[in-house]
Amino acid sequence: MKRHRFLVAAALILIALSATIYLVHYAIFRDANHIFKFMVHHLAFLPLDVLVVALIVDRILSRREKQAMLHKMNMVAGVFFDEMGVRLMERLMPAFDRPEVSARLGVKHDWSTGDFQKAAALAERAKLQAKIDAVSLQEIKEFLHQEREFMLRLLENPNLLEHERFTDMLWAVSHLAEELEMRHDLRNLPDSDLAHIAQDIGRAFNALAAEWLDYVRHLKSNYPYLFSLVLRTHPFQEHRSAVVT
């Protein structure tokens, strides 16, 4: 309500100011024809002014706002992968063929933007099959239970509404956590149930890998020193070490 009153008051003030300037012009030059002619001239350009302001300027501002939003999202992604994302991928990695994963997703220092996009798309479409007997379901369950509150706080972040794929990844991880949490004994599950959990692991891992690749691409473009550390320590490689050799 206050904002509406302010806009009305501002409009009236501007109209009054414009009328006052025209009156001063007439009082000095006594030429109403000149005033009317230039008034029509300015009105003729008004649609072009609206076009420039409403379309071009608005598009520039929207682009800047989108870039700012993406920057915030990448900060959220960085917190997620630093806090739990990378460690979760480490626990899920034994369920997959490491040479195959390394060949597809092993980031190299000379990767271009196209390489990252291709790998991320491949991670989403590949649907890597998990070998359930190669991982400790109990360890994964306990890890996800410890990080449950952290994931819930992330899902409450309003910035995630602008990044549907990241939200879908969190839901895939949350679903895996719920599936494991609902099973009190993970040691003697039937093969049919193990196959179901393997699908959940594969879905979560594919989504994690795709989002991680997008995040690392952002680091390579904007923060090369952080990219250097990720390059030496990411889980999609045989031997990793933070030590620079």
Image (cartoon, helix red, strand yellow):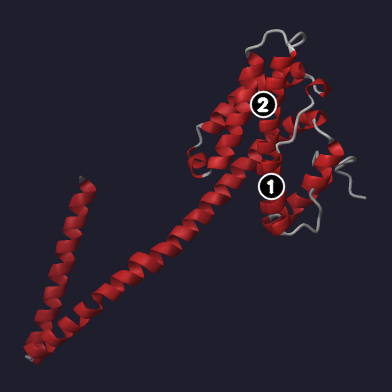
Circle 2 Cα neighbour tier, 10 Å, few/some/many (<14 / 14–19 / ≥20):
some
Which image quarter is the N terminus in? top left
Which percent across, then down, holds residue 238? Answer: 89, 40
Q: Between residues 112 and 34, which one lies in front from this camera angle? A: 112
* Residue 35 percent across, percent down from the top left: 12, 86
**In the drawing, does residue 110 fall left or right of residue 58?**
right
Q: Residue at x 72, y 24 (%)?
A: 198
Which of 65/176 is in front?
176
Local crowd at mark 1 within 10 Å, few (<14), some, or many (≥20)? many
On screen, residue 180 versus residue 236, left or right, reads left
Residue under circle 1?
A: 120
Please name the residue shown 90% across and 40% down the image: 239
The relative height of residue 156 versus residue 186 in the rendered view (above or below) is below
- Counting from the top left corner in percent of width and height, residue 184 is at 68, 8
Tell me, for residue 19, which label it has, or none: none
Q: Is residue 146 left or right of residue 22?
A: right
Residue 48 quadrant: bottom left
Q: Amino acid at mark 1?
A: Ala
Q: Earlier in the sequence, mark 2 or mark 1?
A: 1
Q: Is residue 141 left or right of residue 15?
A: right
Disc 2: which residue: 200
Q: Which SS class for mark 1?
A: helix
